[in-house]
Amino acid sequence: MNNFCTDIGYISLNKQGEQLCGDHVEIVHLPGGYGGDSKDLSSGKELTVAVLADGLGSGVKANILSTLTAKIISTMMANSLSVEDCVSTIAATLPICKVRQIAYSTFTVIRISGGLDAEIIQYDNPQVILLREGKNYPYVMRAETIDSKTIYRSRVKLRENDTFITLSDGVVHAGIGKCLNFAWQRDDIIGFLEDVYDQGLTAKTLSSILLNKCYSLYGGEPGDDTTVCTVKVRRRQSINLMIGPPASPADVNKMMTLFFSKEGKHIISGGTTSNLAAQFLGKPLETCLPRYPDPAIPPTAKIEGVDLVTEGVITIHQVLEYARDYIKDNENYVHWNYGKDGASQIARLLFEEATDINFYVGKAVNPVHRNPDLPIGLNIKTRLVDELAVCLRAMGKQIKVSYF
């Protein structure tokens, strides 16, 4: 993929009083060699399709409309079918609204091939915002009429850190009748995004920041379903994390050699593991006295040649809690983004920096973790890693777990 990949993050607000969101985001990711249509996208490259659909009205009906629309379009476009086919299929498939007598859902599609080319297809949703180097980048849109619907299509040659922000109309409606007399204008939204933009922000975090602003403009009572989906093109970055010594002492050198031979940053979690790594590297292990003590998280340490050294299961358990929150509402962003403890530092590395994560998990059992009074999450470190891997994959990370 030319060493580039897509980071995609989205988050929604339900209309006040509704249990279901009338917006739906669907993402399809196909690895290299998918064999796309050569007249459309470069055959054999990695392909990502992100669809944001906004169903008519709100509640259950809107949820059904948007879900069907997003799933149909994402599946068809991932298989290189034409936009004309997609629109016709949607018109023939969606249920008819008894009140308005129409089958209706707006949609936005971003299809990225190989991290090099983006195709944007828009129907009645707010126009996609493209930030390039943190500033709004105007791209060309071409209007087409398909089944009496005006569809806007664009193609963009991508650069590193290009960031697409797709919106449902709940974003531009934010603040009407409350903080604002009129809708939140596109220029105002762009200005806000340019002000808060930081190259280190993940797609999910940027989506969260914009959605929090919408929630504030609504006065905490959203008047419409509101969704932000961000797609960011970024360079691949590997992070390697080792936790626990191997079950057999004879495998220590093998585990350490494989771990340190990997490109990217290196994190070591666990006291015994850190001591073994220090011995392997022939470097001293130095405990860091926390400048910002957190009684819940043990202090970090230092080994020359290692990017981060932390305690084991307690720290990783907290990282897992942050990861679970991240893939939902990302409410704990402030805690791990600004925290100085080991769990916060690992979270920043895994959530924000990493695209590819390699876990090296030793299966030796620490007698301390047999304590029945410890929470179940601390009993087995392999379970922690397995659950963390699931969360990280949900973030779009490429994960490999090796056991020793």
Image (cartoon, helix red, strand yellow):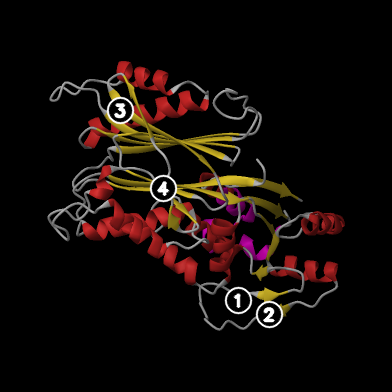
Which residue lies at the image location 57% right of the left edge and 66% below the top edge? Answer: 315
Q: Residues within 10 Å of mark 3 (few under 14, many from 20)?
A: some
Q: CA distance from mark 4 to mark 2?
A: 51 Å
Q: CA distance from mark 3 to mark 1?
A: 58 Å
Residue 138 numbered tag: 4
Prevailing secondary structure class for the magenta stretch in the rendered image: helix
Q: Are marks 1 and 2 in contact (CB under 8 Å)?
A: yes
Image-quadrant location for residue 209: bottom left
Mark 4 element type: loop
Q: Indicate yes or no whether the magenta region holds residue 194.
A: no
Camera-nearest residue between 88 and 23: 88
Mark 3 element type: strand
Residue where numbered disc 1 is placed: 299
Q: Earlier in the sequence, mark 4 or mark 2?
A: 4
Q: Earlier in the sequence, mark 3 or mark 4?
A: 4
Q: CA distance from mark 1 to mark 2?
A: 7 Å
Q: CA distance from mark 3 to mark 2?
A: 63 Å
Residue where numbered disc 2 is placed: 287
> Which of pointers 3 and 1 indicates the residue nearer the eye?
3
Q: Which residues are magenta?
A: 365-388
